[in-house]
Amino acid sequence: MDSKTLPIITTPRVVLRWISEDDIDSLYEIFSSPQVMRYWSSAPLPDREAAADLQREIAEGNESETMLKWGLALRDSDTVIGTTTLFNLSLDNGRAELGYAMAHAHWGRGYMNEALTALVSHAFEVMELRRLEADVDPRNAASIRTLERLGFQREGFLRERWHVNGEIQDAFFYGLLRREWLKE
Ligand SMILES: CC(C)(COP(=O)(O)OP(=O)(O)OC[C@H]1O[C@@H](n2cnc3c(N)ncnc32)[C@H](O)[C@@H]1OP(=O)(O)O)[C@@H](O)C(=O)NCCC(=O)NCCS
């Protein structure tokens, strides 16, 4: 992986940076939480070993550039409190899917909006993607608000798209175009 593919992105309060083995406990805290994982596309992590596996998968995805996942850290402490992801990258088509999650203790402070504003800008202006997509559970009000505040438009309703933790889930599909972001 080189720092051009996964550059450090800094905003006033947070920094998007690589995730290392030192962040395994933070990953475990975020992705084992039932509140965070309620509408996620997989079940909560069962134990710290699963978080260590996740850290390895993240490193592999970043290396192969198939899934770019940044740790969202507070600048004050450098503690990872969330992740932001560009996945299903299709550079030929100029698009990627956006994903994000944050530890529950940090919700409601605007950190994710700050991080995603910087990441979306990076995706459109540095990576020169043309389109970002997001798939969200219709009941996930916080995430829908996050997307709509960034200007994402609801493009579709996909019925029974997911089967997670024994539950069938519908999805809203959202999209945002570079020309809308740049207000061209
Ligand atoms: C989606 C998710 C990241 C949104 O978190 P969030 O805390 O609502 O998002 P933000 O950090 O951008 O905060 C936004 C809120 O903080 C408020 N806020 C903004 N700046 C602020 C500041 N400087 N100080 C305090 N509050 C602030 C905003 O007004 C907003 O609150 P409101 O929506 O009640 O008006 C979070 O709910 C989450 O991790 N969910 C679980 C994972 C998930 O579902 N991911 C998406 C899958 S599709």
Image (spheres, rainbow, N blue to C red):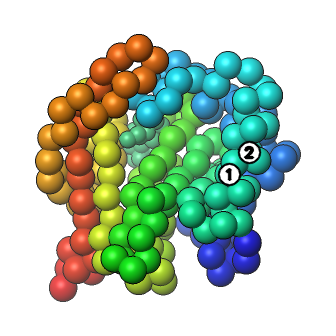
Label 2 is placed on what type of residue? Answer: Gln
Task: Tell me what residue is drawn at x 44 percent, y 59 percent.
Answer: 88
Q: Please tell me the numbered disc located at residue 58.
A: 1
Residue 63: percent from left, percent from top: 71, 66
Is 56 on the left-hand or right-hand side of 62? right
Quick check: can you spot residue 136? yes
Q: Is residue 172 above or below residue 176?
A: above
The quarter of the displayed image where residue 10 is located: bottom right
Residue 34: percent from left, percent from top: 52, 19
Is 139 on the left-hand or right-hand side of 55? left
**Viewport quadrant of the C terminus:** bottom left
Q: Is residue 31 above or below residue 20?
A: above
Residue under pointer 2:
55
Q: Decide: marks 1, 2 in contact (CB < 8 A)?
A: yes
Residue 56: percent from left, percent from top: 76, 47
Task: Tell me what residue is drawn at x 45 percent, y 66 percent.
Answer: 89
Task: Tell me what residue is drawn at x 28 percent, y 34 percent.
Answer: 161
Residue 55: percent from left, percent from top: 74, 45
Q: Which residue is at the front of the view, 33 or 73? A: 33
Quick check: can you spot residue 77? no
Q: Is residue 30 above or below residue 87?
A: above
